[in-house]
Amino acid sequence: MKRRMMIAAVMAALTGLGATVAAAQDYPNRPVRMIVPFAAGGPTDVIARIVAMKLTEGLGQQVVVDNRAGAGGNIGMGLAAAASPDGHTVIVVSSSFVVNPGLYSSIPYDPYKSFIPVSNMAASPNVFTIHPTIPAKSMKELLTLVSADPKKFSVATPGVGTTPDLSAQLLKLTTKLDFITVPFGGAGPAVGAVVANQVPIGCTALPPTTPHIQGGRLRAIAVTSAKRVGAIPEVPTLVEVGFKGQEADTLQGLLVPAGTPKAVVDRLHGQVVKMMAQPDVRSRIEGLGFDIIASSPAEFAAQVKVEVEKWTKVVKAAGIKVN
């Protein structure tokens, strides 16, 4: 009896393995939907479109970007969490994925159970910028101006609870300056508001800001990375100008719904590693201000855990609440 049970267990395992391998070999057998939980034009959308193009080439099926903006990314992430776990729906997330669990009282996904992390593909620091008419050349000079009249100097961010928004809140807590943060509905509108001098200061992810910095329409005064960034090497870090513990970046991660076969996850991860090593992809992504990461599923899962805990603490310290 025991021998028959062992044989049955082995046969079941082999059958499951065969089904998984078959699923991977047959994958994808139709177009793949890539959900982007933000509007077009922001950093996550830019990365997603580069990745979608390369995945289309690598997988032999069209990968279609589907922008589903709203509720700080929760609408798109909820749609992806409820999708069929067969690899034909993937999602590219930003740092809101790890911030929202501490920011909202209720979200339509569990950061640990609703998805399988494939890779943190790339990450970029946040950057503080000012309109060129502001008479400050450094963060120290800017903070001197702000301290003289805090109500005059508001800071545009991509939205409540985004890592740029939390970077501004953390600087506000650190300096004890009562400046106003103005959350917009994405990086594009936030950058545009500073370029138009509607808001004097901005804190956004670097990619949508880089062209305006290089074109002289914005002046960058500090980045939130641990070291200077190749796209704007002349701009110091916050640590360099005297503010420790301010490090923050905006991740760009690829996820699939929980239950997706491991072989499919492995194939997607292999495609990510391959594309991120290609000179044209690396050049485009690094030129936008991102660092290539291409982490493994296990590494990305560990990062998710660390960052959910980290940003939950920052949200509580800043007293931020979103219903």
Image (cartoon, rainbow, N blue to C red):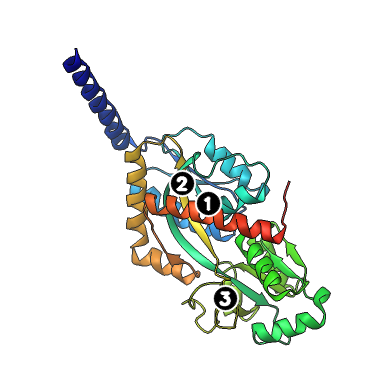
- Closest to the observer, 287 or 15: 15
* Residue named by callout 3: 244
* Residue named by callout 2: 255
Amino acid residing under circle 2: Leu
Real-space CA distance between mark 3 and mark 1, rounded to the nearest whole angstrom: 27 Å
Q: Is residue 168 above or below residue 236?
A: above
How far across and down, in percent of the image, does residue 49 sit? 49, 55
CB atoms at circles 2 and 3 under 8 Å apart?
no
Q: Is residue 156 above or below residue 14?
A: below
Q: Residue at x 38, y 42 (%)?
A: 61
* Quarter of the figure with residue 176: bottom right
In what element is the residue under mark 1? strand
Q: How many residues crowd around disc 2 within 10 Å: few (fewer than 14), some, or many (20 or more)? A: many
* Residue named by callout 1: 93
Q: First in sequence: mark 3 or mark 1? A: 1
Q: Nearer the viewer, mark 2 or mark 3?
A: 3
In what element is the residue under mark 3? loop
Which labelled disc corresponds to residue 269?
Answer: none
Q: First in sequence: mark 2 or mark 3? A: 3
Q: Is residue 94 visible?
A: no
Real-space CA distance between mark 2 and mark 3, rounded to the nearest whole angstrom: 32 Å
CB atoms at circles 2 and 1 under 8 Å apart?
yes
Point out the residue furthest to the front here: 2
Amino acid residing under circle 1: Val
In what element is the residue under mark 2? strand
How far across and down, in percent of the image, does residue 283 sit? 41, 69
Real-space CA distance between mark 2 and mark 1, rounded to the nearest whole angstrom: 8 Å
